[in-house]
Image (tube, coloured by chain):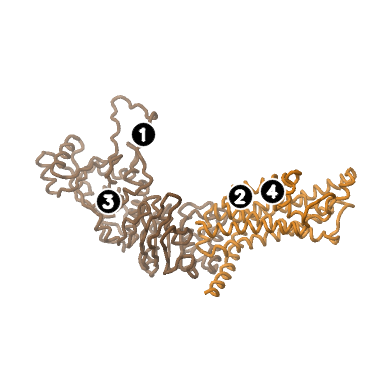
Amino acid sequence: MIEAVGLTKRYGDKTAVHNLSFQVRPGAVTGFLGPNGSGKSTTMRMILGLDNPTAGTVTIGGYPYRKLPNAARQVGALLDAKAVHGGRHARNHLLCLAQLSGIPARRVDEVLGVVGLQDVARKRSKGFSLGMGQRLGIAAALLGDPQVLLFDEPVNGLDPEGILWVRNLMKSLAAEGRTVFVSSHLMSEMALTADHLIVIGRGQLLSDMSVTDFISANSADFARVRTPHTDPALREKLTSALTEAGGHVLPEQDGALRVTGLPLPRISDLAHECDVRLWELSPHQASLEEAYMRMTQGAVDYRSTVDQKAGLQQPLPPGVQPPMPVPGQGQPGWYAPPPPQQGYAPPQPFQTPPAASYGAYGAPGAPGAAPAPGGANPYAAPAQAPAAQTPAAPSATPAPAPAPAPDAAPTKSEDAR
Amino acid sequence: MGRRLDEELTMAAAQVIRSEWTKIRSVASTVWTLSLAVVVTVALGMLIAALSNNDFGNMSRNDRLSFDPTFISFAGMSLGQLAMIVFGVLVVSNEYSTGMIRTSLAAVPQRGAFLFSKIAVAGALALAVGLATSFVTFFLGQAMLGSHKASIGDSGVLRAVIGGGLYMTLIAVFSMGVATMLRSPMLSLGILMPFFFLISNILGNVSATKKVGRYLPDQAGSKIMRVVTPIDDDTPYGPWGGFAIMALWVVAALAGGYLLLKKRDA
């Protein structure tokens, strides 16, 4: 059990963590979420006694880390996958860590097998990919067979197989009654892995609840409405009619409309009244990713802006329309469109969730981080083509949730992810 | 409680020593820096000994009187010590430049035990290499000196030869202390290399600054390698006195490193 009470860390005038109190319980995977620079890593370092808190305390099993008897056998941590000497080969790296904690050398070969690096055990870690580095870091965390495990962004750089493996590893560690604390900036990943979520922004606690509670508290319903794309005027007409009736309308990249505040039959009636045909009218739930973005929107430190390309832009050839700006650019309160797999049924269920996570990697900071106008939006790109051409879109019926890890909240719909 | 803590510290120290030995032998920089220290010291020592032997006939009377064959065979140390500095700096700053320090300190929260066990391992290795270098460079240097050579049995010679090994060890340990304070390998090398190669020599040889310069670690420490005191030498300390001054510098560097490591965020 990890317990933080009023944890505060200041570097000069910058407050990295402010008055953070939470508990991480054994037997569950606790996700630790926040945008870049929100204080996740600082908190992890304070838990491990590497950084001294400016105020407050954090304890593991009742002891501050530096007073914890036999700390290395009780707590395992992956802080930074790149924190290895590149000239040392993988086995020696783990061997010196094992010796540091009085762990026998045969355990080194054991964990190398667990993470699947036995074939490169005698290769210098300089040549490792980020994913192999992550595996080496996870091996180091597992060395002491600890009861408490901390992982800082463990899936960064892993391939889909690796992401799935990490997810199942976390779950099985927690099922053995261990305390598992995993940080991430990916809500989609945490929704699949974690049982409990702690969300911070700008070093302050934003939310501390179970994933189930988080889903029911944060997933808002909306309707997707699509008018014939042959006639943009129809869309304008419907938009104003819906707005007049008290609905809230947001355009999506592919030309569909996202409507909140009106029930589906009412939308249909309004469309009928103003004589607009509908190609799609489908109920949706906002994804957790969106809920998370709404929550952290005010707390994002590094926000991308529209690239003005002043003086760099080529004059458009005559007769060519300037590209439509991507909705969301510079619009406060706008949140990211749903993940890409909504537009089409996943061809191979087992590869879809990692693909979704990768999609989300593409737009790390999202609302503001949407790419430049005309650029490829990682969310929109896969959805655009199928959704636009097949108006009868299968997106109306959420695709059956692929279950890579069968216990991953089977009730969650495609949207809820 | 105190008893348990002592036991834990002893255990931690034993574990760190094993781990540090693995660390130090598993990186290429150890072999490179240490073998460079040996080769440069021995080769340059032999060269200068041979040149001095040829030049002996042209020397002034004073120079002949203060001719110190033992010290001449150690002439290569002025360059060889630079490789020792690199060794000492890298042993410590590798932890920081790779980020390993966080993993290490998470495994051994007793930071004092971690630092001093690390320095003990690296220092012991430096001592072994330093002593070997010192003996090899002495015997090969004397072989070059022909009729002007000293013998290991002469008064003060054995002390000077062992002192040469100790000097190289302390230079390495001093660098470890400085690197612990500064953390960055570039910064540490950027300060230590020019200091020991140039600044200290200038301060120690210019008459205006000589009185201060001779208290610098290498100027004081190298006194132990001398057997014959130069004429008109007014240095106020003997061989072991000079060595003690150098040791004080080393203790200060280590204490600074320890206090900073203990206090600051890793």
Hey, what amino acid is under mark 2?
A: Ser
CA gap, disc 3 and disc 2: 59 Å
CA gap, disc 3 and disc 4: 70 Å
Question: In the visual, does A290 lie left or right of B242?
Answer: left
Chain coloured orange: B
Hey, what amino acid is under mark 1?
A: Gln
When asked about the image quadrant of residue A269, the answer is: top left
Q: Secondary structure at mark 2?
A: helix
Kindly identify which residue carries mark 2: B188
Q: Secondary structure at mark 3?
A: loop
Point out the residue furthest to the top here: A318
Specify the label residue B170 is tagged with. Answer: none
Question: In the visual, does A302 lie left or right of A279?
Answer: right
Tell me the crowding category of disc 1: few under 14, some 14 to 19, or many 20 or more residues within 10 angstroms, Cα based: few
Kindly identify which residue carries mark 4: B196
Tell me the crowding category of disc 2: few under 14, some 14 to 19, or many 20 or more residues within 10 angstroms, Cα based: many
Kindly identify which residue carries mark 3: A345
CA gap, disc 2 and disc 4: 12 Å
Kindly identify which residue carries mark 1: A308
